[in-house]
Amino acid sequence: MPTTEASPGEWVLLSYRLPREPSGPRTTLWRRLRRLGVAQLSDGLVALPADARTREQLEWLADDVLASAGTADLWLARPATLAQERELAAGMAATRAEEYRELTGACRLAMTADRQQRTRALRRLRGDWRAIDRRDFFPPPERELAAAALRELAAAAAADEAPVAGGTP
């Protein structure tokens, strides 16, 4: 399950504009928005399902935009039609599905690595899982496949650490 629960139908929108120069604040904002998993509605307009956490996060980003000589407004809104809402959710789920597929592939690749690389990969991939999970508001089926691949990798890493029967580790 996702780490937050959004109110059905309610979205928090951030409308923003930043000066082209310097480019640093634009790049930083883009990275932070990506990390949050926003739905990009248009240039300078993003949305997240509304809950206390997402609203606070977008408020912080709006403050950063204003501090960088930009403009920012936050809105609470509902899509006009159920089809629009489904399209937003489907787009966000599709993006998370791709991230989960990449995670699954990385887990499978790590299974072929040596013991030390497998252990390092497991730590990194668990962090990747947590990051994806934080922005997963509409879990796609690929989530469970990635979870199974991560469990399989964890089991293999645990087996690597287990002492060899009848011998020294």
Image (cartoon, rainbow, N blue to C red):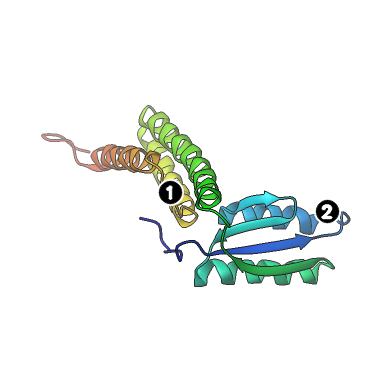
The C terminus: image quadrant: top left
Q: Which mark is residue 23?
A: 2
Comparing 64 with 151, the one in front is 64
Name the amino acid type tagged 1: Trp
Residue ID for mark 1:
129
Question: Where's residue 112, x and y in %?
Answer: 37, 27
Location of residue 94 in the rendering, given as x and y in whole percent from the top left corner: 50, 40
Residue drawn at x 35%, y 55% is 1
Q: Position of residue 30 (x, y in %)?
A: 69, 53
Q: Which residue lies furthest to the top in this view?
A: 112
Residue nearest the viewer, comparing 100 with 140: 140
Q: Can residue 137 be seen in this view?
A: yes
* Picture coordinates of residue 78, whole percent (x, y): 56, 62
Binning the other alpha carbons within 10 Å of mark 2 as few (below 14), some (14 to 19) or many (20 upward) gives few
Q: Going by the picture, which residue comes out furthest to the front? A: 81
Name the image quarter holding residue 80. bottom right
- Badge 1 marks a residue whose secondary structure is helix
Confirm whether residue 32 shows in the render. no
Q: Is residue 106 above or below residue 8?
A: above
Amino acid identity at mark 2: Ser
Looking at the image, tell me whether mark 2 or mark 1 is earlier in sequence order.
2
Residue in the picture at 48% in, 45% down: 93
Q: Residue at x 59, y 65 (%)?
A: 77
Left or right: residue 164 versus residue 12 is left
